[in-house]
Amino acid sequence: MRLLLEAIYAAYHYDFRQYAVASLKRRLAQALIRFDCRTLSALQEKVLHDKQAFPVLLEYLTVQVSDLFRDPLYYLALRQHVLPTLATYPSLKLWVAGCSTGEEAYSLAILLAEEGLLNRTLIYATDINSESLRKAQNGVYPLDRLRLFTLNHRQSGGKGSLSDYYHASGQSAVMDPQLRNRITFADHSLATDSTFSEVHLISCRNVLIYFNRELQDRALGMFQEALVLRGFLGLGSKESLRFSAHADGFVEYRPDEKIYRKAS
Amino acid sequence: MMTPRATYLADRPIDVIVIGGSAGVLDVLRVILPSLPHALAVPVVIVVHVPERSPELLPQVLQHSTPLPVKFAEDKEPLAGGTIYFAPAGYHLLLEANRCFALSIDPPVLFSRPSIDVLFESAADAYAGRLVAMLLTGASADGASGLASIHAAGGIAVVQSPQTAEAATMPTAAMTLFDPDFVLSPPDIAALVASISSQPRSSAWIRRTRTDSN
């Protein structure tokens, strides 16, 4: 596996060398079946010589399906305990790190709109997978997922109706362009790139679980650097800073919802 | 049916115990967990199928069955001997070769997340043959192929006897794939785990754990 990851890095500059091994192995095993390869070295041959194969492999290695307002209590905590503080800033920058196909970024945009903060906010939503970013940019989701999204939204303390923020088109829901206009989707790697802006809130949910501890620490160090003093960091519901080298750089703010603040 | 010799597992190098089950499994765990040695040197890792949005009560409920600490596994947490870990609802739980947990939100396997196959396959890979795995009652085939991987890697595979299982699909699925080392009723599984040495067999395990917690 080491050789394959080195080869991918050398040929395509995608760095999976510090991803958590167990999940990566599982995903590669699935990719082997998809590509009808018997060994990782056969897969390596294939992705190095067949330029069409790599984007497909990238899907296996990176894509995450999320929901709008996944873990509603996280968004409820942001609404009740974080946005009131953010509202004291004249302008706001948020960063969704590892945005995949955009669900988390749109959820935050809706939350900000409902709290009257969207028009002074810029959301950076970054990912390494350009196909995911393209989908995120389009903001089109299957209509059959909206039932769950609507339930989530209500549990997150949603004020209006979620349908105020999308319109149905055939079997799809298209997110309101006014949300999209406040979001900048961009290619950015937590493994190889550095910070690009000072931000007030970073939401990075269920991304760090795929990294090994060294890469987690790299990402968290970057977050610490990017956040304003006392800025907020939101992680996935089963992620914590407890086993990180940066545990001291953040203080628990809403422990149950995994919201931290940069230490002052 | 095979009868376990009390010394059987005491002779084997075991670094972790992994357990999977679904429908009816809580009653079986209430039989098995009390017989774990109170000075158990190895960790116990359990995947039980629960709905993604269920209240998170498993450790609380099963803490009544054992004096050993029972908790949800956390991402990157080093496995500690004598602790019983459950996979959190909505996440796959994997074991890494450096003796730490990893979580994932990869898609459900056989409609389940957490999936027993995901835990067992990662355990087979990370622990080679130094583990014992138990597949209990359940109404899905999840866990069968993972148990086969553990068996192929040299680990000890225990299956709850289908006639004692509230739902026989899970144990039966494993038995159609390979011959498990043990096919036992819950009381016999309890007797088997009671034989697990309370002494760590592998100094390497302790060494790694210490390094990880630094």
Image (tube, coloured by chain):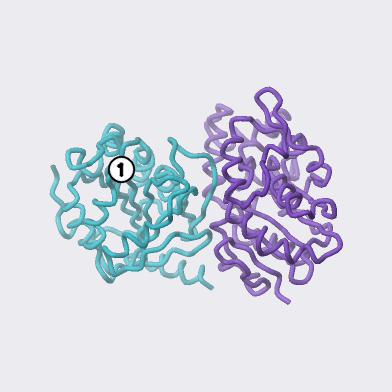
Chain colours: A purple, B cyan
Name the residue tied to disc 1.
Answer: B23
Residue at 44%, 46% in the rendered image: B114
Q: Please state if B201 lies on the left or on the right of B72 as rendered.
A: left
**Label 1 chain ID:** B
Residue type, label 1: Ala
Q: Residue furthest bottom?
A: A264
Q: Where's residue A178, x and y in %?
A: 81, 41
Relative depth, front residue between A39 and A175: A175
Q: Please state if B137 lies on the left or on the right of A205 as rendered.
A: left
Would you say residue A113 is visible in this rendering? yes
Q: How many numbered circles are shown? A: 1
Would you say residue A7 is visible in this rendering? no
Q: Where's residue A109, x and y in %?
A: 74, 48
Quadrant of res A83: bottom right
Q: Secondary structure at mark 1?
A: loop
Q: Where's residue A254, x and y in %?
A: 60, 66
Q: Where's residue A199, x and y in %?
A: 79, 61
Quadrant of res B40: bottom left
Q: Residue furthest top?
A: A170
Residue at 37%, 60% in the rendered image: B59
Q: Residues within 10 Å of mark 1 (few under 14, many from 20)?
A: many
Q: Is residue A9 above or below residue A170?
A: below
Q: Where, quadrant-wise, is the N terminus of chain A in this rendering?
A: top right
